[in-house]
């Protein structure tokens, strides 16, 4: 009985061994893992949880944070459009919209003093109303066109890398004042471009910007008075004075008061005190004697004549 069992086991083992050594090559699906370099086990990977998000928001995990070339024409155009947008928003008086375009922590201190910026916006609107009411719509359009040609000058964009760029001229100089410099720096934050200052504004920096706007308001008020009183009426001169006022400066020499005080030539000759020079003393160390003009000569007094004594009367004996 035991020998028959052994025989059955041996037959089955031989049958299975013959199947394994069959002449038909193994198919691609029954090849052993690791039996060849082409069929090595795959590396363990991470699960892409992004696929669980909304289809419209889904991005493959391998593409998140990927930017492509550091400098591209598209990035330059993005920065150019961004700069034009914030320039036009400030020009339209949308102060809040412009502040939102900054790196948030850079303008936190300025948010507490934005009332000064809003007052400048109101002065600018008042300026337009005065020009329109005093001179008419056509001169106002002429002034706006001249100002726009200066403010909306061609923008030059320099992209340093995929994260940082600069804009020339500084399109927010009328907001930030003298501290702004000639170049506006921007940086990419997430998927957006933001205005980036060299360092976050502190209380002193925010106060300096507020003081700048107070100076701008004072210059606009002075310009409005000159227009209202008729001292300035030419669109070219008004536009030039307005551009200086937006920088916190008085009108160019010769433009203010030219109609009321002897013309431009009289205004272009400042006194010694106005020019900052000390008054020059007369004959201060000169070698030549001052010429005395005939009208300055005084006649010398004639010597006083003493009365002659009267002759004594002759006495006859």
Image: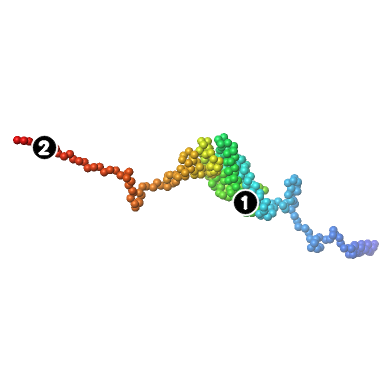
Quarter of the image where the N terminus is located: bottom right
* Viewer-closest of 281 and 60: 281
In the picture as drawn, the residue positioned furthest to the left comes out as 317
Q: Residue at the spot x=39%, y=47% of the render? A: 280
Mark 2 is surrounded, within 10 Å at the Cα level, by few (under 14), some (14 to 19) or many (20 or more) other residues, namely few
Q: Is residue 40 left or right of residue 151?
A: right
Query: Can residue 66 be seen?
Result: yes
Quarter of the image where the C terminus is located: top left
The residue labelled by disc 2 is 312
In the picture as drawn, the residue positioned furthest to the front comes out as 316
* Viewer-closest of 294 and 231: 294
Distance from the alpha carbon under mark 1 to that under mark 2: 117 Å
Which structural element holds mark 1? strand
Residue 267, image x, y percentages: 47, 43
Query: Can residue 209 be seen?
Result: no
* Viewer-closest of 211 and 48: 211
Q: Is residue 315 left or right of residue 215?
A: left
Residue 208, image x, y percentages: 53, 44
Mark 1 is surrounded, within 10 Å at the Cα level, by few (under 14), some (14 to 19) or many (20 or more) other residues, namely many
Q: Residue at the spot x=84%, y=60% of the render? A: 31
In the image, which is nearer the foreground, mark 1 or mark 2? 2
Q: Along the polypeptide, which appears first: circle 1 or circle 2?
A: 1
The residue labelled by disc 1 is 157
């Amino acid at each position: 009985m035991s020998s028959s069992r052994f025989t059955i086991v041996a037959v089955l083992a031989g049958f299975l061994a013959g199947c394994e050594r069959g002449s038909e090559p193994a198919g691609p699906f029954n090849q052993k893992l690791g039996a060849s370099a082409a069929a090595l086990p795959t590396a363990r990977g991470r699960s892409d949880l992004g696929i669980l998000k909304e289809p419209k928001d889904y991005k493959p995990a391998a593409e998140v944070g990927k930017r492509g070339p550091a400098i591209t024409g598209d990035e330059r155009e993005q920065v150019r459009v961004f700069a034009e947008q914030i320039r036009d928003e400030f020009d339209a008086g949308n102060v809040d919209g412009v502040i939102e375009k900054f790196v948030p922590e850079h303008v936190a201190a300025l948010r507490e003093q934005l009332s000064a910026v809003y007052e400048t916006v109101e002065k600018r609107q008042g300026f337009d109303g005065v020009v329109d009411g005093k001179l008419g719509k056509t001169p106002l359009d002429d002034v706006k066109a001249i100002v726009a040609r200066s403010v909306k000058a061609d923008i030059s964009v320099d992209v340093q890398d995929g994260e940082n760029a600069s804009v020339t001229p500084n399109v927010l100089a009328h907001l930030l004042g003298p501290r702004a410099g000639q170049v506006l720096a921007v940086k990419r934050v997430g998927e957006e471009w933001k205005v980036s200052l060299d360092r976050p504004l502190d209380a002193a920096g925010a106060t300096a910007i507020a003081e700048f706007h107070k100076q701008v308001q004072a210059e606009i008020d002075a310009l409005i008075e000159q227009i209202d009183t008729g001292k300035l009426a030419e669109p070219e001169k008004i536009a030039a004075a307005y551009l200086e006022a937006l920088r916190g400066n008085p009108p160019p020499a010769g433009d203010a008061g030219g109609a009321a005080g002897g013309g431009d030539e009289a205004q272009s000759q400042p006194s010694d005190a106005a020019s900052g020079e000390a008054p020059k003393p007369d004959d201060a160390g000169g070698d030549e004697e001052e010429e005395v003009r005939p009208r300055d000569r005084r006649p010398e007094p004639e010597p006083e004549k003493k009365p002659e004594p009267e002759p004594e009367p002759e006495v006859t004996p």
